[in-house]
Image: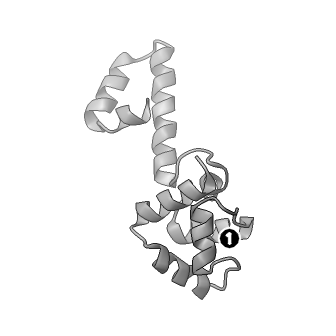
């Protein structure tokens, strides 16, 4: 997924309009936060500077490594949940505790979606 698509996903995740995002970023004095420039980022017509992406990640409460490179999950919570899924899967794959996986899926049904 491109930087522009991740930026758009982060805006949607936080329920923030492009105009509101522009105002917040401009209010922080972030270079590259004009309304037309943000639209170019969203269309992948140009790539934002690393500093812009770090500030955007902070404002939108997403992981900067995800926004910059697409690495991992968008939020710390999702990253922690994905790590727990991997831990449980390793346990199950090692044959240690199939019941653990079944209990986990019953308690947190959306965890099964993270495993796929």
Mark 1 neighbour class, 10 Å CA radius: few under 14, some 14 to 19, many 20 or more: some
Locate the C terminus by quadrant: top left
Image coords of residue 27 (percent x, y) = 58, 87
Seen in the image, is 106 located left or right of residue 38? left
Q: In the picture shown, does residue 54 fall above or below 67?
A: below
Image coords of residue 16 (percent x, y) = 42, 71
Q: In the picture shown, does residue 87 fall above or below 18?
A: above
Give the residue at x 71% y 79%.
31
Image coords of residue 85 (percent x, y) = 45, 33
Image coords of residue 57 (percent x, y) = 58, 65
Q: Secondary structure at mark 1?
A: helix
Seen from the viewer's position, the closer of residues 32 and 96 is: 32
Seen in the image, is 1 located left or right of residue 114? right
Seen in the image, is 51 located left or right of residue 74? right
- Please name the colour scheme applied to the rendered image: one colour
Q: State the count of labels.
A: 1
The image quarter containing residue 53 is bottom right
Give the residue at x 68% y 70%.
52
Residue that mark 1 sits on? 52
Q: In the picture shown, does residue 56 fall above or below 3?
A: below
Seen from the viewer's position, the closer of residues 60 and 46 is: 46
Q: In the picture shown, does residue 109 fall above or below 61?
A: above
* Residue, far top: 95
Give the residue at x 51% y 14%.
94
* Residue, far left: 106
Give the residue at x 55% y 61%.
7
């Amino acid at each position: 997924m491109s930087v522009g698509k991740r930026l758009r996903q982060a805006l949607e995740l936080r329920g923030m309009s492009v105009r509101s995002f522009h105002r917040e970023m401009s209010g922080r004095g972030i270079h590259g936060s004009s309304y037309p420039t943000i639209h170019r980022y969203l269309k992948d017509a140009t790539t934002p500077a690393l500093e812009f992406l770090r500030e955007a990640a902070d404002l939108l409460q997403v992981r900067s490594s995800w926004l910059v490179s697409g690495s991992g999950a968008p939020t710390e919570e999702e990253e922690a949940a994905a790590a727990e899924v991997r831990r449980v899967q390793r346990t199950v794959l090692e044959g240690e505790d199939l019941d653990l996986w079944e209990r986990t899926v019953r308690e947190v049904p959306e965890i099964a979606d993270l495993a796929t």
